[in-house]
Amino acid sequence: MDLNAAADRLYGLPPNEFTAARDALAKEIKAAGNAGLAREVGKLRRPTVAAWAVNQAVRRHPEEIGELLDLGERLRTAWHEQDAEALSELTGRRSELTGRLSRLIAEDAEAEGRRPAALPEVEQTLDAAIVDADAAERVRQGRLTAPLSYSGFVPAPMPRTARTGAPGRPEKSRARERVRREPEREAAEGRAGERRERERQERRAEALRRAAEEADRAAAEAEARHAEWTAEREAAAGERDRRAAEVAALEDRLAAARERLEDAEQRLRVAERDEATAARAAATAREKAAHARAALP
């Protein structure tokens, strides 16, 4: 197993099962002797509900996701080429396809007993995949940990008009028209600039909010893992203390047994010495008895 295979397995799970499954898989890989891969697996982050929903769509509705990503590539090409006709056609298909995918994702969530509360973030992620090639690739992999967004500027197609004025219209008249409309154009541009700035600020605030939420989730997950390892450390310390007590008791018993052995060896040495003395005395006595018998008439 490599990191891609491990990630594919884990990001197919519901978010509430992710952390336990990730930690168990990391332990399994470490026990198999691949500590480096185990560390990489342990770093994988749990997906948010919106990210999980998109990951599931990649697995359950690959045709619709593939169609969406293909549409995004064609739209980006049309934007680049300033093809107004293609943009008009593809934009309509974009709305229809995004809506269809959103409904499928909501139905999948409801079928699993989950409220589709994260649907706006799901739609935001699908839009990012259409507009941005990097986001499209991340969606295609099906391993998102958080919803995606796109805050860049997408150019609109420029109208292709003739450089010359309408037939019969004097140049001075056109000049006066341009002068008359200049303040209106500047005011419109000013309002558009203010709107873009306001939208930019709103996107930035939303991005900061999501970043803070993701940081909170990561902190909570880190705290949970810390609590798990604290419990593991305490259990290991308790086991160590019990084994140390057993060893100390065995060492005490061994010391007592050694003392008893030494006493037994001392007793054996005394007995062997006294036995030898008694044997010599018995031999002497037998010899004297023999001489006494021999002296009898």
Image (cartoon, grey):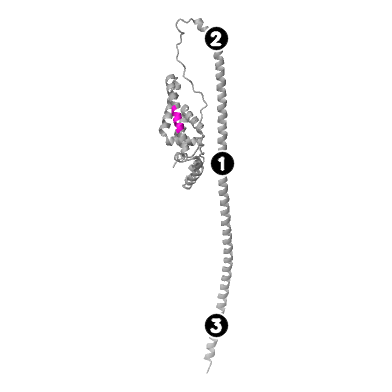
Q: Secondary structure at mark 2?
A: helix
233 lies above or below 185: below
Residue in the picture at 57% in, 44% down = 226
Marks 2 and 1, how far apart at CA: 64 Å
Q: How many neighbours does mark 2 have within 10 angstroms: few (below 14), some (14-19), or many (20 or more)?
A: few
Q: Position of residue 236 (x, y in %)?
A: 56, 51
Q: In the image, which is nearer the foreground, mark 2 or mark 1?
A: 2
Q: Residue at x 44, y 30 (%)?
A: 100
Q: Are marks 3 and 2 in contact (CB under 8 Å)?
A: no
Q: Residues within 10 Å of mark 1 (few under 14, many from 20)?
A: few
Q: Which residue is mark 2?
A: 180
Q: Dividing the picture into quarters, in which one does residue 267 lie?
A: bottom right
- Tell me the CA gap for discs 3 and 2: 150 Å
Residue topped by disc 1: 222
According to the picture, the residue beneath numbered tag 3 turns out to be 282
Q: Tell me which amino acid carries mark 3.
A: Ala
Q: Nearer the viewer, residue 286 or 52?
A: 52
Secondary structure, mark 1, is helix
Secondary structure beneath label 3: helix
Q: Which residues are magenta?
A: 96-103
Q: Nearer the viewer, mark 3 or mark 2?
A: 2
